[in-house]
Image: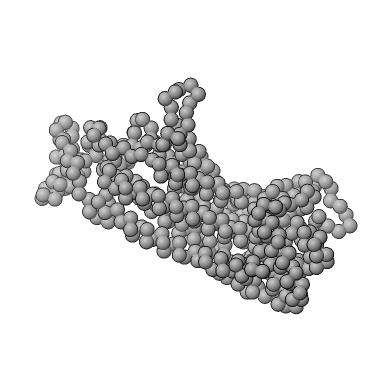
Amino acid sequence: MKLWEKSVQVDHDIEKYTIGRDREMDMYLAPYDVLGSMAHITMLNSIGMLTDDELSTLLDALRDIYKDIKSGNFEIEEGIEDVHSEVELLLTRRLGDLGKKIHSGRSRNDQVLVDLKLFMRYKIREVTDATLKLFRMLQQQSERYKNVLMPGYTHLQVAMPSSFGLWFGAYAESLVDDLEILKSAYKVVNRNPLGSAAGYGNSFPLKRQMTTDLLGFESMDYNVVYAQMGRGKTERIVAQALGGIAATLSKLSFDACMFSSQNFGFIKLHDAFTTGSSIMPHKKNPDVFELTRAKCNKLQSVPMEIMLISNNLPSGYFRDLQIIKETFLPTFDSLIECLNMVTLMLEHITVNEHILDDPRYDLMFSVEEVNRLASDGMPFRDAYKKVGLDIEAGKFKPCKDIRHTHEGSIGNLCNDRVAALIDKVISGFDFPSVDRAYQALLKA
């Protein structure tokens, strides 16, 4: 079934090539296509395009389709072009010509735009929840191991004292900034394109503010040409935000792989969470972190893929945009899986509390000695030179009893303030407004 087909049947190979993986990708969008249709027909009723009885009948049927989708009893049938066609076909089978009325005043262009935005909005919430769980775990481990010192590195050379409180806490705070960027992307997503039709509006007296409110959008994409231009751009913006979280996970994964190796021995991964070698019986490989690093690096390439598909397109709709779905839609679940796995790994991690027993790390306390001498009145540059000469002469004796007090240091992690930061970010998403809108749409 093709909504656009008239008297000439398209060539089979052309049809296969142009549809591509669209039917597969549209399964991601199915529940949101129904929600968008429910809002649209409610608006059509308000402008006299549907009677109250017609609206009630259509809404009941759409709610049934929505339930089938959520329960896994929905598919886009062979020969059906996309999810929009499948939903309209199901309505027509059940309700006859009444099912054909739902497309008045819209195009598949604005239909897929609203589907994508509703999908992105929902998946951003899932990513936010998974990120918040990892954040809580990182802060928990930061507090648990805040008094366990470890070497800090610059240029991969032993540099200054750090702590596991700082290490875990650094990644927690990184996620605060990542969610701040994701919240900005959410603001771009949370604008309603429905009513822009094929990108040039419609002669029906559509009430776009009504569908905006019904779907819980913060506002609308006002200019109908820009609403269409936003496709591709919106996905790129969101992909960049997801890539920020992925970058944090990738860096954390690299650290975990390095710190769990025998040459470091700073952390130990739970035996049940490592894999072995087919030839070396002693091996315990950090495959989860290695795969996470690779997957997250791949996720960071998605914005570039989207840009290369869409950056040389003029205004208006082009079929090129269809390919973006294949690249973009699966990224959410991939990132969520990585977030969940890293949270699990960190929950069961074991920290080496005796790293500093090894004398190879003694020199990282040299700055502490310089600062002690400077605090006692010696000019800093003279103190630096004295300690340097003591090191060269083999006379340096480290004092490992350090006292850092400033905000964000070993002795003052400020984890409570970082937690307050992320709570403020989370509140800015305003997810409850979307919940209320959906509950109103779906109630019988």
Residue 425 appears in the figure: yes
Residue drawn at x 69%, y 73% as measured from the top left: 43
Q: Is residue 411 left or right of residue 339?
A: left
Measured as percent of width and height from the top left, residue 384 is found at: 17, 43
Residue at image position (73%, 64%) is 61
Compared with residue 169, is residue 444 higher up or lower down, i.e. above or below?
Answer: below
Residue furthest left in the image: 377
Q: Quadrant of the C terminus?
A: bottom right
The spot of residue 227 in percent (x, y) is: 64, 65
152 relative to 192 in the view: left or right: left
Name the image quarter holding the N terminus.
bottom right
Total numbered circles: 0
Which residue occupies the extreme right position in the image?
7
Residue found at the far front of this picture: 444
Which of the 4 image quarters holds residue 54? bottom right
Say which residue appears at 75% left-offset and 69% top-offset: 57
Q: Is residue 356 left or right of residue 375?
A: right
| Residue situated in front as seen by the camera: 93 or 380 | 93
Would residue 244 be seen by someone viewing this image from the given angle?
Answer: no
Identify the residue at image location x=62%, y=56%. 232
Q: Is residue 23 left or right of residue 14?
A: left
Q: Please state the horizontal and vertical placement of residue 292, each as a whole percent of the image.
A: 49, 41
The colouring scheme, among rainbow, by chain, secondary structure or one colour, is: one colour
Residue 75 horizontal/vertical position (percent): 72, 51
